[in-house]
Image (cartoon, helix red, strand yellow):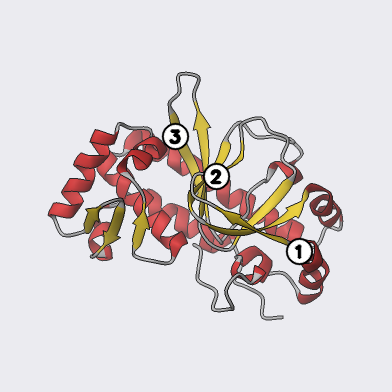
Amino acid sequence: MSKKVTISARDPKQNLILAALPKQDYVRLLPDLELIPMPLGLTMSESGDHVNFLHFPISGIVSLIYDLENGASSEIALVGNEGLVGISIFMGGESMPSSTKVQSAGYAYRLSRKIMKQEFALGGQLQHLSLLYTQALISQTSQTAVCNQHHTLDQRLCRWLLMSLDRMHDNKLLVTQELIGSLLGVRRESVTDAAGKLQKNGTITYSRGIIKVIDRRKLEMQVCECYEVVNQEYERLLPKPSSK
């Protein structure tokens, strides 16, 4: 799972993939990395877009969202500083059927399609880490599909809260129940009921678009196994930042 990197603010190495690169690879890549803001609600790419940049978030959360023809949508995965956005650049498909939108504001370093393809052709550590991350992302997407089919909304909300909080490195989220409903593919009223249960049993507090977890252990006791399954895959596949 994503871990906090104790380095200066807005340093590229706050992204764990960039932090895990050998020194020579990182130094070569650094001049081509461009810091950009990721404001809340920004659509980074639409379904079917030809993606021109790979993004390495250093803060905030990006949601991968599938939009249906009837206007409904559902989050299929989320990305924080443990990963990258834009895998179609190096996977060969050129585009994805999902859109990418900023769920929580932050910053990212972006790398052009051209430079990433050059780096990938070298067959070095960036290629290796990117493919490992893609496998972890596939695991998250697959587990989300299972979770949506077999677990209750209460469990799914707990999973979503924990995964989001892990990537924010905090115990609170600035998010509306309407947005959570959109991401989970349910009505806002259903989220209100589920969040109300968590507030009543002392797990969270919720007011004016701020959810604060006051007892994480309770949240972890109420979540389904999907949260730990995904965590274990991320821990297994993604290395710790390199000290080189």
List x then y, in percent, for residue 25.
Answer: 80, 69
Q: Distance between the residues labelled 2 and 1?
A: 30 Å
Q: Residue at x 34, y 65 (%)?
A: 171
In the image, 164: left or right of 79?
Answer: left
Note whether residue 104 is visible: yes
Q: Which residue lies furthest to the left in this view?
A: 200
Q: Distance between the residues labelled 3 and 2?
A: 16 Å
Q: Residue furthest top?
A: 70
The one of 197 and 92 positioned closer to us in this rendering: 197
Which numbered tag is attached to residue 125?
A: 1
The amino acid at mark 3 is Ser
List x then y, in percent, for residue 179.
Answer: 38, 41
Does 139 sit above or below residue 17? above
Q: Which residue is drawn at 61% across and 49% down?
A: 135
Secondary structure beneath label 1: helix
Which residue is disc 2 drawn over?
Answer: 42
Mark 3 surroundings within 10 Å by alpha-carbon count, few (fewer than 14), some (14 through 19), many (20 or more): many
The one of 68 and 144 positioned closer to us in this rendering: 68
Which residue is disc 3 drawn over?
Answer: 74
The amino acid at mark 1 is Gln
Secondary structure beneath label 3: strand
Find out whether the residues at labels 3 and 2 contact each other: C-beta distance under 8 Å: no
The amino acid at mark 2 is Leu
Find out whether the residues at labels 1 and 3 contact each other: C-beta distance under 8 Å: no
Q: Residue at x 43, y 61 (%)?
A: 166
In the image, 5: left or right of 174?
Answer: right
Tell which circle, 3 or 2, labels the residue nearer the N-terminal end. 2
List x then y, in percent, for residue 42.
Answer: 55, 44
Secondary structure beneath label 2: loop
Q: Which residue is drawn at 30% across and 31% down?
A: 187
In the image, 148: left or right of 232?
Answer: left
In the image, 243: left or right of 170?
Answer: right
